[in-house]
Image (tube, grey):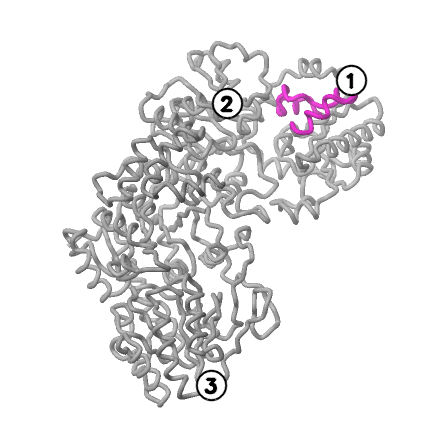
């Protein structure tokens, strides 16, 4: 770490910037692996008769992928095919295939793995390929998940980060075929990974190939291999792995005690076998009872063919066993704990067999097996029909017909919607006007007509971001970028040059297009919207993305944004130089108010040769119903709670407390709440230069010198917080000016104040003015295009952009002067905003003027 700091100090930034791609290429294996994959993908031809298999991230050669492999390897029509298996160094490979001329083994995540993944025509996986995987158009990818979900998956898993599923989500979106045994499995997996309506591949609801192994297994050979006599009944105990690597031995010993206990209780008529996770197997097979543990060389589904009774807990193995119509006993002594921690889709009490919390209950159920089967027969049959309708021993043949021969059938269908699909990048989703306006828009849009997907990095851990995302309408899909782009060294240098120069000719266009496709898979979006407008990465992704219509938003006077200085740094100058050069690639470059649009059109003319038609404006939507509903509720203060693991999309996301003012932090607010005897001014916004709180505080100090009963509330957070605190102290306003920090519900405080005041030097539109108007508050604002667009015509007082102007405005209010001459018709405004969005952003038939 000390060396890195020294390099940063000694080596100039520009030199480090240019050396960075080379450093990655030389020092990072993963970078070189991606480079191998990218070069193979772009230069080597597809091998038409090559099939790439992966099961459990290379951890085994089993399951659905193995079933397809065995079927094809023994089929004369596929004798000329080459089979590539991804395995780990300790993966058990059946002896029959080790030296087979048609079978090649590559180490998972090796350079050979990357090469074969890039050139194989057919790709079969039961989980997910690595993040750098980007399916070629000629490739055919079939994702055959490794079970029917009893345990919750993806977004449905409790206490799990909302982005934890993002690589599986990416794989689903990339798959040509999603193979499933039932509608239940299809819906649970695709919906829990938030892709059901946007997945454009085909659902192949034809059954799991791995269940075919159970029907076609050589039972006699299996019994011999395990060493079980014909007259012995076999009980298989297959629990879910719930241990941790540090206590493998403890859990393994307990499993061994359990099967020995059951074996002794049942006597010699039964043989009990244990099928467990390979962590536990590694310990158990070395014990004196290791012969009772099924080795990893035996496929689980083939093993099920000789099992007479299955004992399990939360494992999906019981779904595979159902077609045998043999009894199942569920043994789980931690149901409440498991449900609270992970969650289940089906209650354990509704499963097709008795639920036992003790081993004695399991043993008693086996003794009373006939009665148990009779009691659960109806439930058993319902489960068969609902979850295993296609598991009849011919699922693999149906899979081959669809994937290799392209045959269609009633069990092959699509889940994608025919609505207009819109992909949006919403900015950092931090506390600002951009976020507020997008939340309002996405909570008002017509979801009968439009399908909305929000795309995001998914790596930002700031709590405000996840708090804001939770406010979005439940119909909004979320795609989270996983990993980074696949790029050659030359492309990275071109990208670096583009970020420095803003010269569009140097941009690695194909790299941006590839990255867009890597993230979105097969999904075809009609409309792309870079709603944030400040990120060169996302602007490039949308500019070069495959849309019927591309839009980018301008939320401010963009020329002034280039000169904005925060703590001796210009945060937007370099980024906006790049983004300005990309404007010409968008169909619409949209400001958020009429006057700001005129300003931007004048200042940015050099970047957009034909601004008429391309440059336009769309006013921000505002959810007045939400604002009115919150004005009388508790004031809510944001604090450092970890919100990334809460996946609910309800708008009512705050914790309920009985106090008058809800404070979500560990301390109550340190300032007095508005009193009726005082005159309470309020301003809301980021603590950043363009808001010019210093000017407001200087103006307020003149008023405060004359009157003792006036107060000013400053709501927000930002880079200038310490500066503003110092100014308050210097002007001796500590008892009259209060920094509240960020409020989750600022409307309650705004509603209790007497007058809203805005001191900005420039704004795109100023959402806060609309919010104040909805609550009927008198308004004072400095004169700039955005606020003037909102207030002109008598909706508030527009004053000179100076200390003097603000002083005069406040004095006019204090002297009883009327600031608002018109009542804001927020219903008509909302209708106009939505209509503008539909007509200018969403209309695919609009012709450029």
Q: Tell me the residue that label 2 is attached to.
A: 86
Please tell me how many numbered marks the rendered image carries: 3
Q: Is residue 824 magenta?
A: no
Mark whose residue sits in front, 3 or 1: 3
Side of 782 relative to 608 (left or right): right
Task: Name the image quarter holding the C terminus.
Answer: bottom left
Sequence-wise, which precedes: disc 3 or disc 2?
2
Sequence-wise, which precedes: disc 3 or disc 1?
1
- Circle 3 packing at 10 Å, graded few (<14), some (14-19), many (20+), is few
- Between the C-alphas of marks 3 and 1, the distance is 92 Å
Determine the secondary structure under disc 1. loop
Q: Tell me the residue that label 1 is attached to.
A: 231
Question: Is 344 rendered above or below residue 224?
Answer: below
| Residue 570: image location, x then y, percent | 32, 56
Q: Tell me the residue that label 3 is attached to.
A: 678
Side of 232 relative to 711 (left or right): right
- Between the C-alphas of marks 1 and 2, the distance is 39 Å
In this view of the protein, which residue sits in the foreground, 49 or 234?
Answer: 49
Q: Is residue 283 magenta?
A: yes
Question: Is 66 rendered above or below residue 127?
Answer: above
């Amino acid at each position: 770490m000390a060396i890195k700091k020294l390099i940063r100090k000694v080596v100039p930034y520009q030199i480090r910037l240019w050396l960075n791609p080379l450093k990655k290429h030389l020092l990072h294996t993963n970078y070189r692996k991606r480079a191998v994959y990218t070069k193979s993908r772009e230069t080597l031809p597809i091998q038409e008769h090559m099939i790439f298999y992966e099961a459990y991230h290379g951890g085994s050669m089993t399951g659905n992928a193995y079933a397809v492999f065995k079927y094809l390897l023994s089929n004369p029509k596929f004798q000329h095919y080459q089979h590539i298996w991804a395995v780990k160094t300790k993966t058990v490979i059946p002896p029959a295939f080790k030296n087979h001329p048609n079978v090649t083994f590559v180490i998972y995540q090796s350079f050979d793995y990357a090469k074969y993944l890039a050139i194989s025509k057919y790709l079969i996986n039961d989980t997910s390929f690595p993040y750098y995987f980007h399916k070629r158009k000629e490739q055919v990818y079939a994702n055959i998940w490794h079970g029917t979900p009893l345990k919750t998956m993806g977004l449905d898993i409790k206490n799990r980060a909302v982005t934890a599923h993002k690589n599986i989500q990416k794989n689903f979106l990339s798959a040509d075929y999603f193979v499933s045994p039932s509608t239940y499995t299809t819906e649970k997996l695709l919906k829990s990974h938030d892709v059901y309506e946007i997945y454009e591949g085909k659902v192949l609801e034809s059954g799991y190939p791995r269940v075919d192994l159970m029907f076609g297994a050589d039972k006699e050979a299996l019994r011999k291999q395990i060493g079980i006599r014909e007259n012995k009944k076999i009980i298989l105990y297959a629990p879910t792995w719930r241990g941790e690597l540090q206590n493998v031995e403890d859990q393994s010993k307990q499993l061994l005690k359990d099967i020995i206990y059951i074996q002794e209780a049942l006597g010699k008529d039964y043989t009990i076998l244990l099928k467990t996770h390979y962590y536990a197997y590694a310990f158990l097979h070395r014990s004196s009872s290791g012969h009772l543990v099924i080795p990893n060389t035996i496929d689980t589904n083939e093993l099920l063919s000789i099992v007479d009774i299955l004992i399990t807990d939360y494992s999906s193995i019981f779904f595979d066993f159902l077609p045998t119509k043999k009894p199942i006993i569920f043994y789980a002594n931690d149901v409440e704990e498991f449900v609270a921690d992970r969650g289940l889709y089906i209650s354990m009490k509704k499963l097709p067999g008795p639920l036992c919390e003790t081993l004695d209950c399991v043993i008693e159920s086996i003794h009373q097996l006939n009665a148990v089967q009779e009691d659960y027969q109806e439930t058993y049959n319902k489960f068969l029909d609902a979850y295993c309708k296609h598991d009849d021993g011919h699922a693999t043949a149906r899979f081959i017909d669809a994937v290799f021969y392209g045959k269609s059938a009633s069990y092959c269908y699509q889940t994608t919607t025919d609505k207009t699909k819109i992909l949006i990048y919403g900015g950092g989703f931090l506390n600002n006007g951009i976020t507020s306006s997008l939340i309002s828009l996405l909570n008002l849009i017509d979801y009968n007509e439009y399908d909305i997907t929000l795309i995001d990095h998914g790596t930002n851990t700031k709590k405000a971001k996840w708090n804001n995302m939770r406010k979005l309408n439940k119909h909004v899909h979320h795609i989270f970028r996983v990993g980074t782009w696949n790029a050659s060294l030359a492309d990275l240098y071109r990208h670096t040059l583009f970020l420095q120069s803003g010269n569009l000719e140097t941009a690695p266009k194909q790299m941006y297009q590839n990255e867009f496709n890597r993230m979105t898979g097969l999904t075809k979006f009609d409309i792309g919207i870079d709603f944030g407008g400040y990120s060169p990465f996302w602007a490039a992704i949308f500019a070069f993305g495959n849309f019927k219509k591309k839009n980018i938003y301008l939320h401010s006077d963009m020329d002034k944004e280039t000169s904005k200085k925060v703590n001796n740094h210009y945060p937007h100058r370099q980024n906006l130089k790049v983004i300005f050069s990309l404007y010409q690639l968008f169909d619409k470059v949209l400001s958020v108010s009429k006057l700001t649009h005129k300003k931007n059109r004048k200042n940015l003319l050099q970047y957009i040769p034909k601004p008429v038609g391309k440059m336009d404006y769309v006013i921000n939507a505002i959810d007045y119903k939400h604002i009115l509903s919150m004005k009388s509720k508790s004031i809510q203060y944001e604090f450092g709670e970890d919100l990334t693991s809460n996946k609910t999309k309800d708008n009512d996301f705050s914790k309920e407390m009985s106090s008058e003012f809800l404070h979500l932090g560990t301390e109550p607010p340190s300032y007095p709440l508005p009193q009726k005897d005082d005159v309470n001014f309020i301003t809301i916004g980021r603590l950043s230069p363009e808001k010019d709180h210093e000017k407001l505080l200087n103006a307020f100090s003149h008023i405060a010198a004359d009157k003792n009963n006036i107060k000013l509330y400053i709501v927000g957070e930002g880079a200038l917080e310490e500066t503003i605190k110092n100014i308050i102290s210097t002007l001796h306003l500590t008892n009259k000016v209060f920094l509240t920090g960020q409020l989750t519900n600022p409307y309650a405080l705004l509603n209790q104040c007497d007058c809203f005041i805005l001191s900005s030097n420039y704004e795109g539109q100023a959402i806060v003015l609309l919010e104040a108007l909805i609550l009927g508050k008198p308004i004072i604002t400095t004169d700039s295009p955005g606020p003037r667009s909102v207030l002109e015509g008598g909706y508030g007082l527009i004053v000179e952009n100076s200390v003097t102007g603000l002083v005069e405005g406040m004095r006019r209010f204090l002297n009883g002067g009327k600031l608002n001459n018109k009542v804001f018709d927020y219903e008509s405004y909302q209708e106009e905003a939505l209509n503008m969005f539909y007509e200018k952003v969403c209309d695919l038939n609009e012709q450029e003027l």
